[in-house]
Image (tube, coloured by chain):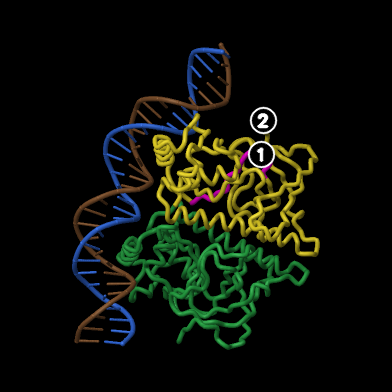
Chain colours: A yellow, B green, C brown, D blue
Amino acid sequence: MHAHSSLTPRPLTAAIAWRDAGGIETDRLRLVGVTRDYARGKEIFGEGEKAEFVYSVIRGAVRAFRVLADGRRQISDFYLPGDVFGVEPGADHGGSAEALCDTVLVVARRSVLVDEGDGAMSRRLWRLAIDELKRCQDHLLTLGCRTASERVANFLSDLAERLDCGTTLELPMSRQDIADYLGLTIETVSRCLTQFQVAGLIKLHGCRTVELCRPRALGDLCE
Amino acid sequence: MHAHSSLTPRPLTAAIAWRDAGGIETDRLRLVGVTRDYARGKEIFGEGEKAEFVYSVIRGAVRAFRVLADGRRQISDFYLPGDVFGVEPGADHGGSAEALCDTVLVVARRSVLVDEGDGAMSRRLWRLAIDELKRCQDHLLTLGCRTASERVANFLSDLAERLDCGTTLELPMSRQDIADYLGLTIETVSRCLTQFQVAGLIKLHGCRTVELCRPRALGDLCE
DNA sequence: CGGGCGATTGAATTACATCAAATTTCGTGG
DNA sequence: CCACGAAATTTGATGTAATTCAATCGCCCG
């Protein structure tokens, strides 16, 4: 893919659905807008910027994060194809977002999320927020309670499930990204992966491709 | 207060507002229902239970948490007077909630949150979820990046602000609760507090009362 | 006043971080 | 297609913040 950051002049309309958590509410948020390419590492929006647009991932992946004054970074979530992000109730973005790899997004004006008077849009936004909150609470449990190995095992299991990629997982993010997501260092992440490989749980084919040899055993490690 | 857990026969109507994050949307959620007393430590709802009711704190405090299979516990949030909690889009509660101390709640059937057709209720629920998400992401930053001292300092500053109590803070929770909230042990929490006391930042009057002597310096510790 | 639980303090241990190479991966140009 | 070089990852040695284990203290409540 030849990525560039300018608004592409493609007036393409894309309809995006995301995972349905329950089964009660079949109503999903659909985002209509233009597609736009972001090169690896490019900023999508920054903390404190006006939240003018909302986004949905078509291809690639995105990291959402905040940084402390001294540069320590916490990645709160990775967004994958089908995910919607950047939706804020306030005027400004509370965190930053960057493309992990060359990435294609649907970008829509925030105003497309306005209600048609029936409250359906607000209900979709509520669902979106609650689903993200649930993921955030899971993540909190991981950072507060789990050991390094459990964190990495849980990360691999979760990512494999979200990418729906069978047993061979293509990591869109670097070790540094994984470390900043899991509250560890790159060295510790690396050691955990080799430890899993030695134990026969995974097999690394280059550092971005992970084959899950015993996904069940990996899942058990997560507690 | 003489707390008990049975539904009190007081058909009191309480209207509860919570903190407004922005300034744009002045519309706040109000919960109408009966009040109910919970003794210290009593369960309000458990993980996996049907989410039949929603709650608002009148007096006291509540811990929301999840536990791993082996008993490790992560407290995701404390709810204080004015806070609304227990609102779920799905059928079941994703976590548990217990009273930290003798506590009075407004309990309302979930059905009171149904829209009147104008989407106003869904918008309020969205705001509620987003505000909780923001708090959760702050918490994530703490658990992923900060040292033990920074966590405890941040915890004290945040709680003092939320309780709006000036410089003398009455802790509604035990050291174990603080530890499980911050991803630390009780010993580490205790050591941080004495360290702050030695440094002249706080003064402990019994283990539940904290006087913030230099709140600014404490805030600076949070990064 | 005395019993018991929660909190504090101290000593030893450890999981993870830090510091410092060695090695692999991968993009780029010959 | 292969070789080169920079960047990312892995591996090893050492350091340390926080945990664990073990008393002791002190606050509360009968």
Question: Could you say where residue B137 lies in the image, as x and y percent from the top left?
Answer: 54, 56
Question: Could you say where residue A6 lies in the image, as x and y percent from the top left?
Answer: 71, 37
Tell me if B223 is positioned left or right of A34 in this view: left
Tell me if B115 is positioned left or right of A217 in this view: right
Looking at the image, which residue is at 72% across and 46% down?
Answer: A107
Q: Is residue B221 visible?
A: no
Viewer-proximal residue among B221 and B143: B143
The part of the chain drawn in magenta is A57-68
Viewer-proximal residue among B52 and A95: B52
| Disc sitting over residue B91 in the figure | none
Please check the rendered image and state whether residue A62 is part of the magenta-colored stretch, yes or no. yes
Looking at the image, which residue is at 69% across and 37% down?
Answer: A37
Looking at the image, which residue is at 51% across and 53% down?
Answer: A139
Q: Looking at the picture, does residue A82 appear above or below residue B85?
A: above
Answer with mark 2 or mark 1, whichever residue precedes in sequence. 2
State the residue position of label 1.
Answer: A59
Q: Secondary structure at mark 2?
A: loop
Q: Pointer 2 and pointer 1: residues touching (CB < 8 Å)?
A: yes
Please, which chain is the residue tagged with disc 1 on?
Answer: A
Determine if marks 2 and 1 fall on one subunit: yes
The quadrant where residue A190 appears: top left
Q: Amino acid at mark 1?
A: Arg
Task: From the image, state whether disc 2 or disc 1 is nearer to you.
Answer: 1
**Count of numbered badges drawn on the protein:** 2
Q: Alpha carbon of mark 2 to alpha carbon of mark 1: how far? A: 10 Å
Q: Secondary structure at mark 1?
A: strand
| Disc sitting over residue A1 in the figure | 2
Q: Amino acid at mark 2?
A: Met
Question: Could you say where residue A113 lies in the image, as x and y percent from the top left?
Answer: 74, 56
The quadrant where residue D27 appears: bottom left
